[in-house]
Image (cartoon, grey):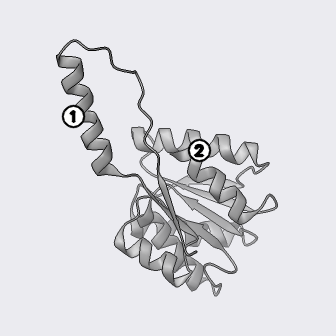
Amino acid sequence: MGFAAGETFVKMVGPDAVVAVLEGVVAASSNIDRMEGYRQALAAGGITPVVTQTANYNRAEGLTVTENLLQKNPNITAILAMNDEMALGAIEAVRAAGKVPGKDILVAGFDAGDDAQAAVKAGTMIYTVEQKTVLMGETAVETAQKYIKGETVPANIPIDVEIITKE
């Protein structure tokens, strides 16, 4: 999921973007997996983030962390957040810095929450990622049933994500 979303991020912000990354809870598997995919996609696109900092999947921390990052790195042009809450906080920090989110600084999120989808429609967030959690749950139950019956099941079952953009 992180790699697919990361490829979209690279295409949307361009190779010359000055990128900050907002991580979730550092030890959480969701953060570890997303970050690994994003790192690979960013590196493939020639982007090295200028700073990566945790905001613990929290909107208020996303705001505070981004305010601090923008003071220390005023040349940031894109912010990649591991979830929507941090991205929404970052959008507020961008506004507070007197910049226009979606224009001066591009912000991306993850989870496709209602507020994030509204931000995408408004043009303040460039995208959010729908993980298809219902499909993930259904697939997990079906796979568990097969396993219990003694059937061979794959070690990994990829689920496609949907990247929600304004277009």
C-alpha distance separating marks 2 and 1: 25 Å
Query: Where does label 2 land, which residue?
Result: 3
Q: Are marks 2 and 1 in contact (CB under 8 Å)?
A: no
Q: Looking at numbered disc 1 in the image, what kind of residue is underneath it?
A: Val
Query: Where does label 1 land, which residue?
Result: 141
Q: Residue at x 77, y 62 (%)?
A: 14
Q: Residue 107, percent across and down?
A: 59, 69
Q: Residue at x 43, y 79 (%)?
A: 118
Q: Looking at numbered disc 2 in the image, what kind of residue is underneath it?
A: Phe
Closer to the chain start, of discs 2 and 1, is 2
Q: Quadrant of the C terminus?
A: bottom right
- 33 sits to left or right of 95: left
State the count of labels.
Answer: 2
Q: Residue 120, percent across and down?
A: 51, 75
Q: Residue at x 70, y 56 (%)?
A: 10
Q: Residue 35, percent across and down?
A: 55, 44
SS assignment at label 2: helix
Is residue 63 at least partly visible in the picture? no
